[in-house]
Amino acid sequence: MLATSIAVFSLLLLQAGSPPQSPNAAGQPSASGSQTTSAPQHKKQRGARCLATIIQSGSTNSRPYKVFIHSDGSATVRLEGSGSALHSQAAPPQEQHVAAGTIDAKTLRQLLEEVADVSTIPGGFCAKSVSFGTRTQVSYAGKTSGDLQCIKADTSSDADSAKLQASQALGKFVRDTLSNLKVNASRVAPESLGKP
C-alpha cells in the first residue's frame, strides 16, 4: 500500500510540474467552439469561413485537387503534387487563391441546405475511361457526397424526386464552378512557369 501511495504521489508531482497544454495544441476545439479539422489557410480567407469543399480526383494526366469555397465567394485551390515516374518533370503541390465574389456562395449555400446530407445524394454508375476518368465530390457539414458526375436519375416518390432535383442542381453548380475556375491540374508542370 505504501508503494502504491508513493507511485500516485510521484505521478501527481510530475503532472504538477509539466506546463499546461492549450486545447488547440492537442488538436481539440477551443472553448469558443471553433473546429480545427482543416488547416487555417483553408478554413479562412479574409475572415470568411469555409462553406464547402469540392474534391476532384486525379487521372493519368491530371492531378487531384480540392477547392475550399468560403462564405464570401472566395476560394483556395490546393493541387496535390505529382511524382509520377511516367513524366520527366514532376509538378509540386500548389495553392491558388480566388478573389471574394468569384463564386456564388449564396446559391451554393441554398443548394447545400436543400440537399442537407450530401452523403445521401443518389449515386449511380456512369461509364468512364479507366485512365482518364475522374470523380467529383463535395464535402459539406462533415459529410462527403458520392460522385456528382454519376447522379442516379430514377426516383420512387415525390420526396425522392425533390431530392434528385436538388442533387442534380448541386452537381451542375459544382461542374460549372470548376469550369469557370479553369484549374490547371496537369501532372507535368508547365515550362512557362519557369520554376524548377
Image: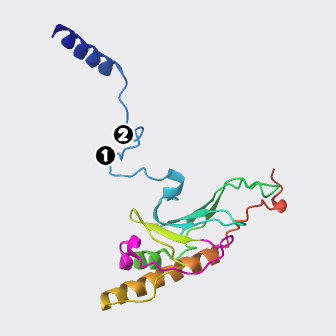
* Tag shown at residue 31: 1
- The residue that appears at 36% across and 47% down in the rendered structure is 29
* Tag shown at residue 113: none
Query: Circles 2 and 1: CB distance less than 8 Å?
Result: yes
Relative to 100, is 4 above or below? above
Q: Residue pushed farthest left?
A: 1
Which residues make up the magenta segment?
A: 113-134
The answer to if 189 sits in the magenta stretch is no
Task: Say which of 152 and 101 sits in front.
Answer: 152
Q: Residues within 10 Å of mark 2 (few under 14, many from 20)?
A: few
Give the mark count.
Answer: 2
- Which secondary structure is most common in the magenta stretch? loop
Label 2 is placed on what type of residue? Pro
Q: Residues within 10 Å of mark 1 (few under 14, many from 20)?
A: few
Please provide percent x and percent y for residue 97.
62, 62
- The residue that appears at 34% across and 90% down in the rendered structure is 156
Residue assigned mark 2: 23
Please provide percent x and percent y for residue 141.
38, 65
Question: Does the rendering let one see residue 67?
Answer: yes
Q: Which SS class for mark 1? A: loop
